[in-house]
Amino acid sequence: MKTNDWLQFALFLGCLAVITKPLGLYLVRVLDPDGRTWLDPVFRPLERFIYRLIGTDPRREQGWKEYTVSMLAFSFAGVVFTYAILRLQGFLPLNPQGLPGLSPHLAFNTAVSFTTNTNWQSYGGEATMSYFSQMVGLTYHNFVSAAVGIGIAAAFVRAIARSSTKTLGNFWTDLVRVTCYLLLPVCLVFAIFLVSQGMIQNFDSYTKVTTLEGAEQLIVQGPMASQVAIKMLGTNGGGFVNANAAHPFENPTPLSNFIQMLSIFAIGSGLTWYLGRMVKNQAHGWAVWSAMMTLFIAGVLVCAHFEAEGNPIHQQLGVAAADGNLEGKEVRFGVFNSALFATITTSASCGAVNSMHDSFTAIGGLVPLFMIELGEVVVGGVGAGLYGMLVFVVLAVFIAGLMVGRTPEYLGKKIQAKEVKLAMLTLLVLTLSILGLTAWAAASDWGVAGLNNAGPHGFSEMLYAYSSATGNNGSAFAGLTANTPWYNTTLGLAMLVGRFLMIVPIMALAGSLGAKQTLPPSSGTFPVGGATFTILLIGTVLLIGALNFLPALALGPVVEHFLMANGDLF
């Protein structure tokens, strides 16, 4: 890494630390039904109108089962709504290119993808989606799927903070308030900033131009800035165009690249401060944040190191080692910014990319894959990262209790067999989906037929695809032909499993913790702030979250690394 790279990295971490507390304070107000914000004069009438429209009392709280059922019903309706739009696209307005409706399997995959905050794309956006589909079908989900994740995290935190409670808040209230008071206003400002950097926002038909070689080329147009703003802030990641954030319209300048990276981490980072404030233990919130940042920094350094080292086979062909691995990277951003972006987007369940991960070196590509398989708890998706990390917190406290021979307590609540079983169930669901579906694809003709690379790299492509889908990330190695009935269907199922079959036991865990009485601290209470707890939490994430995937990683990127050093490529 060069001096400029270190300065950029330090600036990113510094800016993130600075905005964490203000965002956390604002989230405390937004996630309180009676919380007052400076946006109340603008959005309070809209909030009340929405409550009347859907017929809900914003102050009537729900138990974990009712909260979960409301979330599932809302999400199911969203899948059906978006599927209908995509199938009927050819008959709907704002379609200047006359793009037809999507096939049944691609419409299913895409509807599930955006509903689950995954935004996996088995298509090229500019050649497949009309403006109406982009805005009404996809951008809509970018807002509400992010709001759902934040709401689930808030419900979990309330369960920890309250004593002997049967309610965890109101799903509809959380959904409306997060959308109105947080996502909409921030994205409005963010979109205007992106337009100032050169990003397009219009309803024009594509521009036809003649290249210097005399060929005709279509230049994409459309309402791009409005979608990119929420795709980053809401850790959605779905690109308006196929090249995603490597395209000069989606990411025009180094400043837009930096702010987009910062926006991916912003809300997830702020939620750690929200956690500390709500449980009245700010040191605990900072300890969770520190664990996330330690894992993130390690990932960036490893990825950047191997990308800067480059490919020894390229170097034998005369490519200087100082250039690093520039294959698949946008030269405006270079090696370090590509490695940093890749680690951020896979740590945060975002999936936006400014380079092609398929072209990374073997270990450079292992890092984003590994970040997803940790459960994407290194800041993670908005809300999803926090409630995923809280599962590891419960397990870390349980392990600490076993080590000292005392009944584990987390912030005054005893961790017993039920809580541990529910926590482990969420991790087993993740593991079974990723490894089970990857094994199925690797042993099937339809799975192998989609590969564009042989050997361990081809296996890594399949492993990455199902890791990304189950982890609700959405990025891809990009060498996999996934727009087929089998891949679209199985990846869609993986997204549903990764979102909802993990949320249900997590909400059950929240319900169990909320019902427990909070006990005063005693000599047996394990401190959940400070360096000792941070180290224990990191160890728990690495040991429990990663060990399940080490054999598969050894068969893919690790083997490929040694073969690359021996002169073999795939």
Image (cartoon, rainbow, N blue to C red):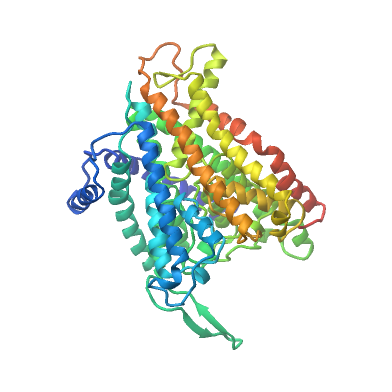
Residue 307's place in the image compared with 413, above or below, is: below
Q: Residue furthest bottom?
A: 214
Residue 259 seen in render: no
Which residue is depicted at the point 40% across and 12% down?
A: 522
- Percent of width and height locating residue 506: 46, 33
Task: From the viewer's side, name the closer residue of 140 and 36.
Answer: 140
- Percent of width and height locating residue 478: 62, 59
Task: From the viewer's side, name the closer residue of 362 and 481.
Answer: 481
In-image side of 501 versus 412 (left or right):
right
Residue 327 seen in render: yes
- Image quadrant in which you'd find residue 527: top left
Which residue is depicted at the point 29% across and 47% down?
A: 176
Residue 113's place in the image compared with 35, above or below, is: below
In-image side of 445 versus 34 (left or right):
right
- Image quadrant in which you'd find residue 315: bottom right
Task: From the viewer's side, name the closer residue of 215 and 364.
Answer: 215
- Percent of width and height locating residue 570: 76, 58
Residue 543's place in the image compared with 468, above or below, is: above
Please state the total of marks drawn on the protein image.
0
Which residue is depicted at the point 28% across and 42% down?
A: 173
Task: From the viewer's side, name the closer residue of 406 and 548.
Answer: 548
Residue 543's place in the image compared with 303, above or below, is: above
- Percent of width and height locating residue 346: 54, 48
